[in-house]
Image: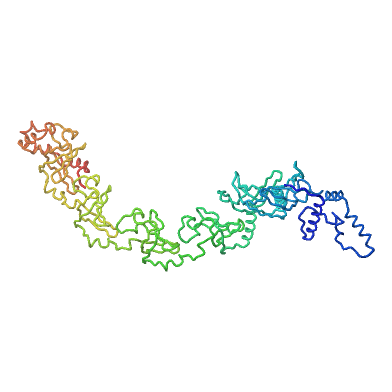
Amino acid sequence: MTINKDPKDVLLSEEEKILEQKSNQNSPNTQTISKEEVCPSSAGSHQETSSEPGNALEDDQDYEEEEMDDEELERMYTESLKHIEEGEVVKGTILRIMDDEVLVDIGYKSEGTIQLREFRTPTGELKIKVGDIVSVFLETMEDSDDLIVLSKEKADKIKIWDDLIAIYDSGQTIEGRVSKRIKGGLTVDIGIAGFLPGSQIDIKPIRDLDSLIGKVLKMKIIKLNKKRGNIVLSRRSLLEEDRDKKRKVALETIEEGKLVKGIVKNITEYGAFIDLGGIDGLLHVTDMSWGRVRHPSELFVVGDEVEVMVLKFDQANERISLGLKQKTPDPWEKVDEKYVVGSRVRGKVVSLTDYGAFVELEEGVEGLIHVSEMSWTRKIRHPSRVVAIGEIVEVIVLDVDKENKRISLGMKQTEPNPWLIIESKYQVGSKIAGRVRNITDFGAFIELEEGVDGLVHISDISWTQRIKHPSEVLKKGEKIDAVILSIDTQNERLSLGIKQLQPDPWSKVEEKYPIGSIAPCKVVRLTDTGAVAELEGGVDGFIHVSELGGEESVNNPKQVLSIGDEIMVKVIRTDVEARKIGLSIKGYEESATSAELEEYRRTHKPGRINPVVSGLEDSTAVSGSEDSAPSSSSVDADADKEKEEPSSV
């Protein structure tokens, strides 16, 4: 919308505005021409006319000036507008606010219009009214429709650039709101879009840039190019300057033994770094608590404010060691007074190892329950079978080493020692019943009662039977009877025997099997040098290869005997102490009668044991011959070779 004005009206309007400017000391327009300069005649027109005759000539002159022609006024008005040029920012007055446009007067012969949207705030609000003075950009003096073209947005941008250049030149800071994340950094609104590189956001790398969107940051302009419209910002430079200032102050005030406050900056496995204001100190995990700390994250998170003590300050290398537990007294100073040997205390299991469990008696004071101190009777392979982390246990203080900060504790001592009453409850030689709890290569453990086990050694399982492993005779969980052989309360050991339930058959061997007697037996094992035969009562005897009998010599017992054969033998040697019996088939054949030999031959396989056929009539003579009888020395020698064969456990 454009209103064409009469030059006189425009000039008078300008006169009034200029007068108002001077009265308010704030010129709203770009015009700087006083009313007297624009129209000198108007200045005197308001003066009172002198009544003196001498003033008549002056009145005539004033009247002539008021009668200036229109051409002069037009010339003067045109001269007043010469300073308004295209491409400049000028002041204008809002004359009218319409639906889509705003009419603005910049003191030119015609007004200009600006789109209403250019006056709205980012939130859409409209904060203008008629009469407001605004800065606008004069794009064109007259367009094709003889209208002036104005823009508020361009004026605002020019002003912003001028302000930014001034800030950049002076090194001042500027605030801006992060609008979005882009490749390599952030876009920040500082009136126009500026670029904040990721490396310039903070002193330390920030992983989540999206968390900064919408936040207002204080920054510095580190690069500016108006021609290209580029502005590079930096927040890091401000933080570094602030850090350096704080660092200088901190280095001047830090002293060993002094309490200081800081912020947890970083957490590692070995400690936490505390920002003391421009300088970092290390709070090692061992200095966080008098108690056990597995990881610093159990006590702190990044951003926590803490008060710590300066333990060591290396000013040359700017290294600071901090401590938290040093703020409180060491609990070990009075531990010997609080935890007396023999006293009963309670604590929480905080750690388990292969050799025991650590129990926290109070913060910073822990004691060890060795695995051997957990049970009187059970053999504990690992503490986890008895206690668990976090469990509250009752223990007895066994020993206190204040200097080395060690306390020995016992769990089994909280109960009576069952081994102290074992001797009164079980006597040596008495018969007991128990359950096979465990089987090993060397024997079997028999549980007499809960917590009390006895060992049956493999040699005490049988008097006569050859046993390679206890599992051949015993099964886990089986209930058996046994005899108590010995009790060792000091070492908490109890020996048992199964074979002792029966009398030792070797004790009557000489009486039952005298030398020269004939006895039946059964072949149970064959060797290269002879055969092992079982007599009645489970006693084993040895038949040397030279005593197998027959007309021809035998080199291998398997030629004439098989395992399981039932044969008759003659006892030719006994040694009860060594548990050996020498047997002879040959001796039996020589001493037997013809009827006995016939019966023997009839009941045995032909050819296995050589029968006496041709020499039956000479059996008596043969049996009486010393040459036919085996020498005791040869039998003894052969028996010694097989000393391990008979079962003499």
Q: Is residue 421 left or right of residue 81?
A: left
Determine if residue 509 is in view: yes
Residue 221 in picture, x, y percent from top left: 67, 50
Render colour scheme: rainbow
Q: Which residue is pictured at 19% across the width and 45% down the height? A: 465
For this orientation, the residue located farthest to the bottom is 337
Residue 217 in picture, x, y percent from top left: 62, 53
Residue 317 in picture, x, y percent from top left: 60, 56
**Count of picture labels:** 0
Residue 427 in picture, x, y percent from top left: 21, 60
Q: Is residue 395 left or right of residue 544?
A: right
Q: Is residue 145 left or right of residue 321?
A: right
Q: In this orientation, which residue lies closer to the viewer: 72 or 160?
A: 72
Q: Is residue 236 left or right of residue 538?
A: right
Determine if residue 624 is in view: no
Does 349 appear above or below 195? Answer: below
Does 69 appear above or below 634? Answer: below
